[in-house]
Structure formats: structure tokens, C-alpha cells
Image: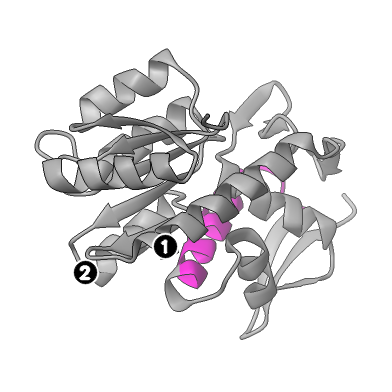
Amino acid sequence: MHNDKHILLVEDDLNLGLLLMDFLESEDLRVTWKRDALSGLQQAQRQRFDLCILDVMMPGMDGFSLAKNLRNQFPGLPFLFLTARLLREDKLKGYALGAEDYMTKPFDETELLCKIRVILRRSAQEATGAEPAAVQIGRYRFDAGRQELRFGEQAVRLTEKENEVLHLLCQHQNRILRREEAVEKIYGKYDYFLGRSFDVFISRLRKMLKEDPHVSIDNVFRVGFILNVREG
């Protein structure tokens, strides 16, 4: 009997898709497999999934475009990429979109399973944990439980990763948040690409917080960042 964790696999390669589905189902995971991005998106709109595994290179809509659509419609839904492409720019783009991980083919099935279990376990812990209270950041109100940043009557819905980064910054308000520690806390490990991805989220949050001149996210050279909230 399968557990209640349901994975959406979007992979156009017939042999790899069959192998992955058989392997994951043998490990007590429910899998729905689609062979193109549009079918995958439509399936995600029809039922709830706990994780999406997305091929990058597919005919029609590619995996990056699919991830962007999924992120916009389901901000809390985690996803990881599988790809035969080894380009550094692709890996950075994948992480910038909010991917939990980026695995290049051929990959070790056991390593993939470990990554899946870590992601599912973290998602379950976040779902059952106490919902963080909304906090004031200058003239902004940040509600991490709702993944919402509000300025007056305007509200922005944050992606899961943007939400996690801002929540960490708030926990260290007016104190240094060390970059490597923050990346490890959010992704479970640290490497160059994940660090670059983290920097992308910092840049996005800076733009979201630009309306209040008393709020800034400042660099501490080679150390990290500080969310500075000054008296106005």
C-alpha cells in the first residue's frame, strides 16, 4: 500500500519515465507521470501533489516555463529538475526559479530518492509546525504563514523560497544573517549555485521592500546580509 505522498513526474523520455515511475512506486511513493509540460500543468491543476520532478528539455513548453507556471499557481509546491544539460546558466536559472535541486542525467536513483525524502520531510514539518506570527517590517506587514507581504492595501504573494528567506532575515532583524548558514538552512546544503540562487531571492526581496526608505537589506562583505529596519 502506498503512502499519501503524491509526486508529479513530467518526463518526455519513455524509458526513463517508466524506470523512474517503477522505482519510486517500489519505494512506497505514489507517482503520476506525464510526458509533456502542458499535460503536467493540467494535472497539477486537477489534483494536489507534494512534489514535482520536471525534465528541462521537452517539446513545446520546457521545464523552466512549466516550473514558472507551477510557482505562480501553487507557490508552496516544491519541485526539482532533471536534465541532460550541463550548462552553468541553466543550473542558476533552475535555482533562481525556486527549485529544491537540479540533477543532471545520468543520475543515481538512490541519490534522487534521498533528495525526495528530504524535501517531503521538510514540507511535512513546515505543514505541521506552528504557523509563524505576522511581523511588522517598517511600513510593511509580513505574514509568513500566508506567504504574503503587505504594504498598505497592496499585497504580494511570495514564493516558498522568497518566504523562507524573508522569514530568516526577520529572525535576524538588525543583525547579520550569515550567507552560508542561511543557504544550508533553506536548501539543506551549500554550494556555489545555491549561493547564487539565494542572492537572487535577496535581490527580489530588496525590490519588494523598496517603498519604505527606512527598510533595507544590506550586504556585509563576504559574510552575509542584514535586514535593517530604522526608526521612521
At 24% across and 23% down in the image, what residue appears? 39
* Tag 2 secondary structure: loop
Q: Of 79 and 171, which appears nearest the observer?
A: 79
Left or right of 18, for residue 154: right
Residue 55 lies, with reference to residue 118, above or below; the image says above
Residue 87 position by quadrant: bottom left
- Image-quadrant location for residue 91: bottom left
Label 2 Cα crowd, 10 Å radius (few <14 / some 14-19 / many 20+) = few
> Which is nearer the eye, 215 or 221?
221
User: Residue 147, how many percent across, how many down?
Assistant: 66, 34
Q: Amino acid type of disc 1?
A: Thr
Rendering coords of residue 86 (x, y %): 21, 69
- Circle 1 residue: 110
Q: Is residue 221 toward the left or the right of residue 36 in the image?
A: right
Residue 21 higher or lower than 176, as above or below:
above
Q: Mark 2 sits on what residue?
A: 87
Residue 13 makes an appearance in the image: no
Residue nearest the observer in this picture, 72 or 78? 78
Q: Nearer the viewer, residue 59 or 157?
A: 59
Residue 114 place in picture, x, y as percent: 51, 60
Amino acid, disc 2: Leu
| Direction bottom: furthest residue | 222
Taking the magenta stretch, the answer to whether it contains residue 211 is yes
Query: What segment is highlighted magenta in the picture?
Result: 194-214
Magenta stretch encompasses residue 32: no
Return the disc, 2 or 1, that comes first in the chain's sequence.
2
- Where disc 1 sits, the SS reads helix
- Residue closest to the far top: 46
